[in-house]
Amino acid sequence: MLFSKPGDEELIDDVLNGDTSAFSGLVTRHQQKLIGFCLSMLSNRQAAEDAAQEIFIKAFTSLPGFRKGSSFSTWLYRAFGRGELRRNSLGAGNFCGLGKS
């Protein structure tokens, strides 16, 4: 018998119903793409990983506001990605690979 992996909405429902460990499935599914997105905006991998972690933390705490039927990845990038990258890059002076001069 084959079992399919739960989709994003199913994982979100599980988290909202008290199974907070289900959030790790969302992280596993979206982590590498989110780090890649952050890396495209920041100058180093460590900063990108830190920004991605902060984005996931904000997403977890804001999950009750997620609109069902929406794309989790789009919500993740739009709701949290831009702000976190702006905060991270301004603090480090490393936006788009440009260091402080």
Image (cartoon, rainbow, N blue to C red):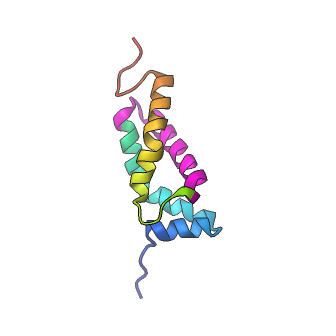
Asked if the magenta segment contains residue 72, the reply would be no
Q: Residue at x 50, y 30 (%)?
A: 87
Q: Position of residue 65 (x, y in %)?
A: 55, 56
Q: Quadrant of residue 1?
A: bottom left
Against 65, is 6 above or below?
Answer: below
Whether residue 84 is visible to the viewer of this picture, yes or no, is yes
For the record, the magenta segment spans 40-64
Q: Is residue 94 left or right of residue 12?
A: left
Against 32, is 64 above or below?
Answer: below
Q: Position of residue 36 (x, y in %)?
A: 36, 43
Q: Position of residue 77 (x, y in %)?
A: 41, 47
Whether residue 46 is visible to the viewer of this picture, yes or no, is no
Q: Position of residue 91 (x, y in %)?
A: 51, 24
Q: Residue at x 43, y 70 (%)?
A: 7
Q: Nearer the viewer, residue 62 or 23?
A: 62
Point out the image quarter for the C terminus.
Answer: top left
Q: Residue at x 39, y 26 (%)?
A: 95
Q: Is residue 41 left or right of residue 54?
A: left
Q: Residue at x 55, y 61 (%)?
A: 23
Asked if the magenta segment contains residue 62, the reply would be yes
Q: Is residue 19 left or right of residue 12?
A: right
Q: Nearer the viewer, residue 87 or 41?
A: 87
Outermost bottom residue: 1
Against 75, is 85 above or below?
Answer: above
| Secondary structure mostly seen in the magenta stretch | helix
